[in-house]
Amino acid sequence: MEQGSYNPFVTAQKQFDHVADMIGLDEATRVLLRQPAREYHFTIPVKMDDGSTKVFNGYRIQHNDARGPAKGGIRFHPQETIDTIRALSMWMTWKCAVVDIPLGGGKGGVICDPHNLSKGEQEKLCRGYIRQLGKNIGPDLDVPAPDMMTNGQHMLWMMDEFEAMHGGHYPGTITGKPVGMGGSLGRTEATGYGVVYTLREALKALGIDIASTTASLQGFGNVAEYCARLYVGLGGKLIAVSSWDNHDKKAYTFRRQSGIDVEQMASIKDSFGTINKDKAIEFGYEVLDGSDWIAQDVDILLPCALENQITPEAFTRISNKVRVICEGANGPTTPDADELIKARGIYLIPDFLCNAGGVTCSYFEQVQCNMNYFWTKEEVLEKLDKKMTSAYWAVHKLAEDKGLYMRDAAYVIAINRVAEAVKLRGWV
Ligand code: GLU
């Protein structure tokens, strides 16, 4: 979402331009890669339960498909903007490239608030989305997945509509499907676990024992929850979690200095990630302002919710104790805040590397669908760990060898891979 004067697409282009200059990217490739290749904007009329018809605005943006079909989630959010989707589609291209999976970048969205839609209305919206877009996506073209406020059930309705349109079974059309319906075991955990795989390796690189660390987390949706579970599982102490309260329409930070019990926290959240405040107080958590997660005296900050959360203003609240920022969300840091992170020497694990576990598991889901043979959860997570770990070390090593900021190092690897594909195909 745009926030204040920050537009995520401007951020994504600034980040790209900076590294394109650094690596001397030729003009044609630069023009091609600093904007999406294709955009679909459409309306989705839905017959609501009360008999009225509501028209929603839907989008799908394919940034680049030189390395494989476009890939990326579909978001349902009331404040969705076209520029947010543009930025996210671009970040998907870099994400797939940095972990070296044969997919491009895309993203979709619908301006809506699923909290206010019945199950039946959500199903109609999903099916309507595919009726408008079904000719422009597919296993060989563009493969959607869940994202903010969308889930496996939404994906399955979409796949069903796609299959009805095309007359056949095409499970590789969409990922993040429920297990047993073409979904992969481990997909639910994948993004959050992937965040912690990169964090675990970063702490090794920095010579810090994870069991001696404390962390503060923004978000308690799927990514944040599984990130919290694995971080605590590996011995880390999570002391604060901030999450959106859909009843009060504001965020709160829940803090317990002795450590958050993630299982207990998860048991009092609803399906959209709202934590039951009264129960949290009963369980001994302090309730602070939503923005206070960033001001905790911890070693690690885990922004795992939204774009544009670490601005220069928010940066002034970051404790001098913080050693690592691990970006589970897409685009949580603004370019001007990047300069401050660099200057203070905080180690950054950049978003499109850090949160690439979800799309990596989506790729595994496609592979399993193609074989029509499904791996065990252990096999999936082991493969995921390997992919994330090797991508992390490639970026860390480049950053160290060339004295680069971690975000820039990740961009150098990703842009070079995509630029190479574009050249080999003869597009430039
Ligand atoms: N929505 C996730 C992301 O931003 C996953 C995308 C996918 O699996 O295609 O990375």
Image (spheres, rainbow, N blue to C red):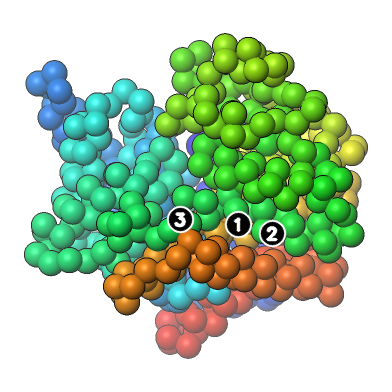
The answer to whether residue 391 is above or below residue 265 is below
Q: Give the crowd class for mark 3: few <14, some 14-19, many >=20 residues within 10 Å.
A: many
Residue 198 - label = 2
Secondary structure of the residue carrying numbered label 2? helix
In the image, is 183 to the left or to the right of 337? left
**Location of residue 212 in the rendering, given as x and y in whole percent from the top left corner:** 86, 45
**Ligand 1 lies under 8 Å from the Cβ of mark 1:** no
> Residue drawn 66% across and 31% down?
261
The mark found on residue 194 in the picture is 1
**Circles 1 and 2 in contact, beta carbons < 8 Å:** yes
Label 1 sits on what residue type?
Gly
Of label 3 and label 1, which has the lower sequence position? 3
**Amino acid type, label 2:** Thr
Nearest to the observer: residue 46 or residue 363: 363
Instruction: Confirm whether residue 428 shows in the render.
Output: yes
Residue 409 position within the rendered picture, expressed as x and y whole percent measured from the top left:
72, 67
For the point 68% across and 36% down, the residue is 217
Residue picked out by circle 3: 187
